[in-house]
Image (spheres, rainbow, N blue to C red):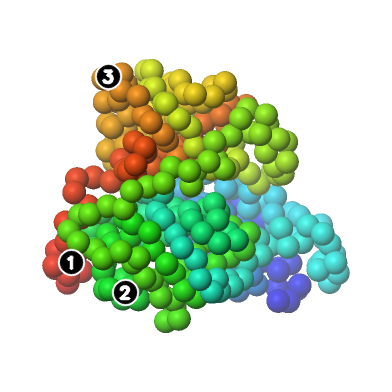
Amino acid sequence: MSSVQLERISEEVKSFVENLTYNGLNLVTMDSIKQIELFLQNASKVKAFRLATSLRYLHIELKRFLDRSKAFNINRYIFFLSNCWLLCRAFLNLDLSKAKEHALYDKLLGKVEEFNLIKEVKLRLIGVEKVSLEGVMFGFIFYFIAIEGKNKGKIYKWSLMQPPKGGIQPELLLSLSLSNSQPASSINGLFFRDIQVENLPCSETDCIIRLMGDQKTKIKFLKPIVGHNKDPFPIEYLGDYHFSSKEILNKINKREITPFDITANFVDYIYIKNVQILDFKITGEDESKTTSIIFATEHSKDFPIYIKIQDKVINQNLIESLKENAKNKTKIFGMFGKLILEKGKLGLYPLGLFDGTNESFPVLMGDHFIDNREILKELYKK
């Protein structure tokens, strides 16, 4: 990477952001969008991935603004606009010819972690998150826990994303073929059973895995797949994530918060027991049409925690499921999810629910075991 190229790109982006800030949104045109696309390409070429990510989200928000989309969020726009300016200013203030010696240089770049192969690991799916970036991509993030070996208890995540094509629902992706599985199966086969994976590409720090795309990777189902049979889920797998308030405080104190972080920060994964959904309210983000549903809860530990879910179409099944629990005053045996710190309060985004022997994924709609491969083929043809 040339330090001269990075300096030039930083100057161009910084100047663009300052002009955009001075002139305001009313002067944004498709030329502005094309300019960001060029910046995005150039930032990727010099491996300034953190800058490229902020440019990508800035591009998404400005495109939403031009399209008069309800998904446009002024807070996200300001955040990523500011992020771009701060990163460019940091690059310009560094002596880039000696930048590699600077301790924060790799963090500013957002250096992409290399993937190493895990020779063999046994996994169990314990969480599913549905993702949708309007007009950009949609799909799932699957969360697995290692159930044996030296990495036992570690959480791995796998993203399955597609660009939008017509009105495709994310659930249709679950019928895609796992060509490297034994016996052959669709992605639906990963649910409710233990699997063994050989030669699994994995990033060490973020624990991101790639179940598809590498010919060396082999997935083996440890029991025959017969109909909708389920392997019992040993709940002790989640014991390491049943934190006390003291353990959570220690985790928060160890986290490094930077000016580039958003107001809601991921702390860790968490498992809570005997969850009672008390009530819920709808909140709206300032100067935005985005609303969220906030559920108050009681559980077996001594710290308060709420559940916050954005009121989007992709989350409706999860929201309705929790509303039903609140209405019927039904206790949830166990809930696994992402622990979030937002404005000094602890929040949880549910990824999986447990009744003692089985898991469920309420974010999914309908019977996701339906084989939709033929429907997928027709949609992709269109």
Residue type pointed to by label 3: Lys
Dot 1 alpha-carbon crowd within 10 angstroms: few under 14, some 14 to 19, many 20 or more: some
State whether residue 355 is above or below residue 126: above
The residue under the point 73% across, 76% down is 2
Q: Is residue 319 among the parts visible in the rendering? A: yes
Q: Residue furthest bottom?
A: 215
CA separation in Å, label 3 and label 1: 37 Å
Q: State if disc 2 and disc 3 touch (CB < 8 Å).
A: no
Q: Amino acid at mark 2?
A: Gln
Work out whether residue 63 or residue 112 is closer to the camera in this orientation and state it: 112
Horizontal side of residue 18 vs 130, given as left or right: right
* Residue contact between numbered discs 2 and 1, judged by CB atoms under 8 Å: no
For label 3, the residue is: 327
Q: Which mark is residue 373?
A: 1
Residue labelled with disc 2: 182
Q: Earlier in the sequence, mark 2 or mark 1?
A: 2
Relative to 80, 368 lies left or right: left
Instruction: Pick the quarter of the image with the C terminus.
Output: bottom left
The CA span between labels 3 and 2 is 43 Å
Q: Residue at x 42, y 35 (%)?
A: 335
Given this view, does label 3 or label 2 mark the residue nearer the observer?
A: 2
Instruction: Say which amino acid is labelled 1.
Output: Arg
Q: Earlier in the sequence, mark 3 or mark 1?
A: 3
Point out residue 254 in the picture as x, y percentages from the top left corner. 73, 41
Instruction: Give SS at disc 1.
Output: helix
